[in-house]
């Protein structure tokens, strides 16, 4: 890169920046960062801590007035360290050039974007991917996303979201790995490794971001942005471990969040960000605020004004300000007034510059700006193959009475019903900002590739076609036009595939719901169809667990397909017609009714767990305690038998648990073998069950396989309320099985 030399000071800076830090190959990144930091003014340092959203069409005229003009000037002054939502090689190159060539030190920008589950080629929503329990496939999916994102100039994704959530009302459960900490940890690592690869400077990897630190998934009553309030044991044992796993996998950035946790907005929480993340865990990347969350300290009532918000957030260890303009406007003054120490600023800037060096942006700020690559990598056929594989693995078979599924390809009369069956947009989910609308293969399109005996009827309209990322989806609750036609078609068909669920824009950020049933007239449609044809297969598409009690009771076959992205129809068709045997397992409990929420498998026992003849035990008077479908649940077109549970305690530091799994059926299948433990008596009450291992195995018909797990301190210990990891002696119950409720049981004692 060639910065324009404006005067001798700049020349000096140029010499120092490009000659000293870069040409001396033997200098470490730390030394290069220090040399650069020495050259920076306070304002330039604060500038690195400032991130702006894309504010003007870079290919259009330069903004001359208003906020855009101010921001443009900031770019030229080097008062912006990062941009978000600027994509495309041409745009990125132009902005980068402006900063590199016009600002005094020419420090390159880092470009961030929400690459949540794919860029142009869209993978299943993260909750769906989690249902695969297939870490290699999940890693591959993140690699594909990174490859495409890097090809359009992006250096950094705001993913993975590693928030644990137990509340299906919260719309963002679609973006995480579900309710379980252990599964969440493994998936966090897989995603970070997938995005970042082994070499961050390569042109197909990007920096990852573990978010939202911490507790955002516990928004009270599932209402997005709401307060979270839970105790230290939940914080240490449930909420933090997936973040720690991401840090151990070398995640380069962490995003804080919008929520208050135990009275402190996490963006201003120095215990979380400084004491735990940076000190205790040794995280050496940087912390980005959530969107304007520094400014939100004011409405929270935690800061009087934006200036004080900047002071609190910087002191608490929030290194970069996303779009609140708090830092760029006030932080230098706060330092001059002695309210924020310059060492805090230096620490933040060091972290940010380090990541930029690690991405190779100082060697070549345009390294992600290759127009040829942009053309070649987007929608690459390998990417489509990868997300198809991921999509198939994400599907969960919830019910299959009488082996209604798979359907024979030569079945004469197949009815396909439901608006979602014919939708190319909704299956892309809500976080698909880089993709193009209507680019998913619809279920109908997918099915028609397998059979020419398909007739389609929409049924009543459900969703507003104008649904978008910014708005709520309007639902038709009254107009039944289309009902009769669909029911008539069902009546004359051999089998009915009825595709129902939520629109892709009904889950995601800002999309909390209090009702978790099928929206609009969909349940009525299902009931009418079922009255005339009992061979009904319900294909569900949704971004969260739903309450499906009538459906589960009556409909013989149910497939949970979530929102599967670009390859939706192809994946579902392969499962429906039996070319792929489903193997997904639920990463979140499905409640019977909203009143059970939050409902999760790894709860503590109450003091009154057992049914009594009177009312004084822990239960509801109008609902069962048990969920509709438990965590870890999912069927296959074959069945698996578990036998010969063996527990070998000869090595106390590595207890071996072994089980034999046999494929009892006539077709090959995959099974996720799950190991749960229960620490029976401990100094902190332990959950009734905790997942501590799983393996996905493939078995030929009638074949058996021994599956072995190792239990070490890591699995057997827990955090006490002083945040110390302890392993306590005593008895542990073990369960190895096919879901969190069903398995072989044993126990052992640690002395
Ligand atoms: C979300 C973040 C996201 C950011 C940038 C916020 O509203 O909470 O998860 O990364 O916007 O788009």
Image (cartoon, rainbow, N blue to C red):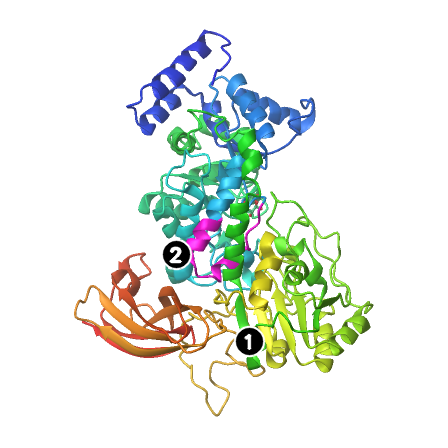
Direction front: furthest residue: 410
Q: Is there any visible trace of residue 65 in the rendered image?
A: yes
Q: Is there any visible trace of residue 170 in the rendered image?
A: no
**Label 1: few (<14), some (14–19) or many (≥20) C-alpha neighbours in 10 Å:** many
Q: Position of residue 98 (x, y in %)?
A: 56, 21
In reply to whether residue 135 is colored magenta, the answer given is yes
Q: Earlier in the sequence, mark 2 or mark 1?
A: 2
Q: Between marks 2 and 1, how big is the CA–CA gap? A: 27 Å
Q: Which residues are the magenta region?
A: 121-141
- Residue drawn at x 50%, y 56% as measured from the top left: 390
Q: Along the horizontal axis of the image, is 468 left or right of 179?
A: right
- Residue drawn at x 37%, y 51% as measured from the top left: 244
Is the CB of mark 2 within 8 Å of ligand 1? no
- Residue drawn at x 31%, y 22% as measured from the top left: 25
Q: In the displayed structure, would residue 506 be above or below residue 19? A: below
Q: Position of residue 571 (x, y in %)?
A: 57, 60
Question: Where in the image, quadrant-wise, is ligand 1 located?
Answer: top right
């Amino acid at each position: 890169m060639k910065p324009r030399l404006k005067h001798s000071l700049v020349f000096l800076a140029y010499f120092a920046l490009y000659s000293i830090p870069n040409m001396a190959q033997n200098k470490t990144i730390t030394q290069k960062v220090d040399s650069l930091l020495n050259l920076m003014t306070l304002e330039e340092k604060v500038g690195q801590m400032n991130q702006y959203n894309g504010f003007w069409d870079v290919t259009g005229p330069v903004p001359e007035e208003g906020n855009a003009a101010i921001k443009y000037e900031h770019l030229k002054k080097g008062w912006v360290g990062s941009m978000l939502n600027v994509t495309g090689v041409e745009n990125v190159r132009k902005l980068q050039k402006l900063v590199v060539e016009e600002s005094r030190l020419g420090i390159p920008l880092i470009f961030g974007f929400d690459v949540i589950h794919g860029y142009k080629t869209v993978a299943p929503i993260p909750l769906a991917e989690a249902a695969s329990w297939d870490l290699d496939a999940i890693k591959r999916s993140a690699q594909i996303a990174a490859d495409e994102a890097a090809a359009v100039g992006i250096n950094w994704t705001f993913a993975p979201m590693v928030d644990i959530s137990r509340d299906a009302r919260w719309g963002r459960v679609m973006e995480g790995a579900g309710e379980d900490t252990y599964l969440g940890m493994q998936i966090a690592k897989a995603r970070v490794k997938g995005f970042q690869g082994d070499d961050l400077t390569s042109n197909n990897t990007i920096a990852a971001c573990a978010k939202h630190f911490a507790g955002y998934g516990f928004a009270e009553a599932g209402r997005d942005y709401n307060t979270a309030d839970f105790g230290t044991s939940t914080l240490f044992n449930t909420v933090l471990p997936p973040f720690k796993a991401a840090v151990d996998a070398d995640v380069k950035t962490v995003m804080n969040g919008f929520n208050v946790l135990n009275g402190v907005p996490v963006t201003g929480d120095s215990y979380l960000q400084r004491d735990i993340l940076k000190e205790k865990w040794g995280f050496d990347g940087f912390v980005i605020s959530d969107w304007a969350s520094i400014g939100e300290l004011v409405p929270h009532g935690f800061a009087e004004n934006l200036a004080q918000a900047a002071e609190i957030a910087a002191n608490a260890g929030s290194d970069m300000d996303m779009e609140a303009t708090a830092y760029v406007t006030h932080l230098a003054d706060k330092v001059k007034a002695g309210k924020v120490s310059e060492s805090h600023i230096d620490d933040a800037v060091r972290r940010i510059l380090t990541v930029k060096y690690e991405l190779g942006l100082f060697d070549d700020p345009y390294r992600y700006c290759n127009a040829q690559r942009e053309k070649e990598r987007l929608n690459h056929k390998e990417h489509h193959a990868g997300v198809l594989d991921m999509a198939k693995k994400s599907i969960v078979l919830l019910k299959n009475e009488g082996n209604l599924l798979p359907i024979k390809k030569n079945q004469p009369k197949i009815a396909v019903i439901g608006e979602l069956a014919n939708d190319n947009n909704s299956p892309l989910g809500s976080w698909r900002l880089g993709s193009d609308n209507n680019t998913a293969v619809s279920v109908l399109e997918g099915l028609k590739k397998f059979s020419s005996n398909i007739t389609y009827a929409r049924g009543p309209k459900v969703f507003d076609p104008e649904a978008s990322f910014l708005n709520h989806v309007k639902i038709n609750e009254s107009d039944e036009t289309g009902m009769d036609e669909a029911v008539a078609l069902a009546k004359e068909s051999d089998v009915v595939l009825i595709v129902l669920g939520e629109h892709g824009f009904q889950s995601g950020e800002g999309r909390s719901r209090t009702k978790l049933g099928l929206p609009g007239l969909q349940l009525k449609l299902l009931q009418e169809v079922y009255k005339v044809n009992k061979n009904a297969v319900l294909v569900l598409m949704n971004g969260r667990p739903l309450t499906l009690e009538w459906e589960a009771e009556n409909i013989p076959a149910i497939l949970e397909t979530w929102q599967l992205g670009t390859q939706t129809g192809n994946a579902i068709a392969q499962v429906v017609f039996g070319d792929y045997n489903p193997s997904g397992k639920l990463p979140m409990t499905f409640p019977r009714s909203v009143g059970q929420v939050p409902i999760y498998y790894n709860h503590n026992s109450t003091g009154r767990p057992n049914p009594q003849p009177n009312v004084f035990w822990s239960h509801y008077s109008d609902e069962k305690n048990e969920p509709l479908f438990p965590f870890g649940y999912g069927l296959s077109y074959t069945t698996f038998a578990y036998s010969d549970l063996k527990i070998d305690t000869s090595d106390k530091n590595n207890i071996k648990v072994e089980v034999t799994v046999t494929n009892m059926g006539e077709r090959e299948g995959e099974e996720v073998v799950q190991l749960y433990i229960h620490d029976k008596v401990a100094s902190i009450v332990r959950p009734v069950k905790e997942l501590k291992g799983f393996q996905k195995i493939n078995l030929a018909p009638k074949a058996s396989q021994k599956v072995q797990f190792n239990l070490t301190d890591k699995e057997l210990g827990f955090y006490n309320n002083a945040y110390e990891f302890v392993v306590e002696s005593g008895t542990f119950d073990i369960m190895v099985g096919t879901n969190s409720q069903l398995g072989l049981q044993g126990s052992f004692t640690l002395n």
